[in-house]
Image (cartoon, rainbow, N blue to C red):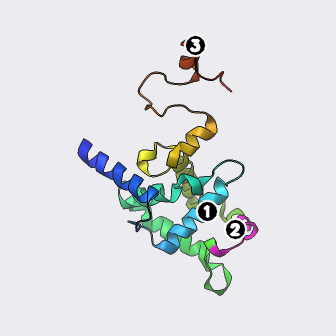
Amino acid sequence: MSGASIAAIAQSACTARDRPVSFLSLSPADAADIEAIAARIIPTTDTPGASEAGVVHFFDRAFAKEMKERLNEVLEGLAGLNAAIDDNGRFAGLSPDAQDARLREIETSDFFGLVREMTIFGFFAMSEYGGNKDHVGWELVGFQGHNGGWEYPFGYYDAEAEGGGNDGE
């Protein structure tokens, strides 16, 4: 894949995350379910969670491009998750307590493992890949790598050596 292709994918993911646009691989209902699952995995508390990080856009772009072979697996997992909900409801429409109970029922499944892993990746990945909007994941852990992971300083330890930065807290 060329550098121009990678740049186009990254820009598309950021645009989708930052402005309301249609999803590439997920229906709005499936995207709402994915966002609700991710929000239970990394909830909003006194700090931003998966919703604020735009993790659902990381999912959508990954399933449209690099992970398109896994899209059906996720859609089947969502169908199974929603099949047990009364009155043809959707996971996103459940109360937070009901969502937690439903997720506990499937927490050992391959589907949940994949969604959990992608939620974490989307929360902490470089924002160019569609998640980590406004670097909320990085801010949460105190990572000051907005200059890119390949440029000095690499972390608080380099900043301390230069006499600045935080004290590693």
Question: Which residue lies under the disc numbered 1?
Answer: 37
Q: CA distance from mark 2 to mark 3?
A: 47 Å
Residue at image point 64% right, 75% down: 93
Q: Nearer the viewer, residue 147 or 2?
A: 147
The tag earlier along the polypeptide, 2 or 1, is 1
Q: Is residue 75 above or below residue 149?
A: below
Which element carries disc 2, helix, strand or loop? helix
Residue at image point 35% right, 55% down: 12
Q: Quadrant of the C terminus?
A: top right
- Residue type at mark 3: give it: Gly
Q: Nearer the viewer, residue 156 or 40?
A: 156
- Label 3 neighbour load within 10 Å: few <14, some 14-19, many 20+: few
Which element carries disc 1, helix, strand or loop? helix
Which element carries disc 3, helix, strand or loop? loop
Snapshot quadrant of residue 41 = bottom right
Q: CA distance from mark 3 to mark 1?
A: 42 Å
- Residue 108 appearing in the image: no
The verdict on residue 142 being magenta is no
Q: Main secondary structure of the magenta part?
A: helix
Q: Is residue 40 above or below residue 87?
A: above
Q: Looking at the rendered structure, which numbered label has been put on residue 24? A: none
Residue at image point 62% right, 71% down: 92
Measured as percent of width and height from the top left, residue 132 is found at: 51, 47
The residues colored magenta run 93-102
Q: Looking at the rendered structure, which numbered label has been put on residue 163? A: 3
Q: CA distance from mark 2 to mark 1?
A: 8 Å
The tag earlier along the polypeptide, 2 or 3, is 2
- Label 2 neighbour load within 10 Å: few <14, some 14-19, many 20+: some
Snapshot quadrant of residue 160 = top right
The verdict on residue 95 being magenta is yes
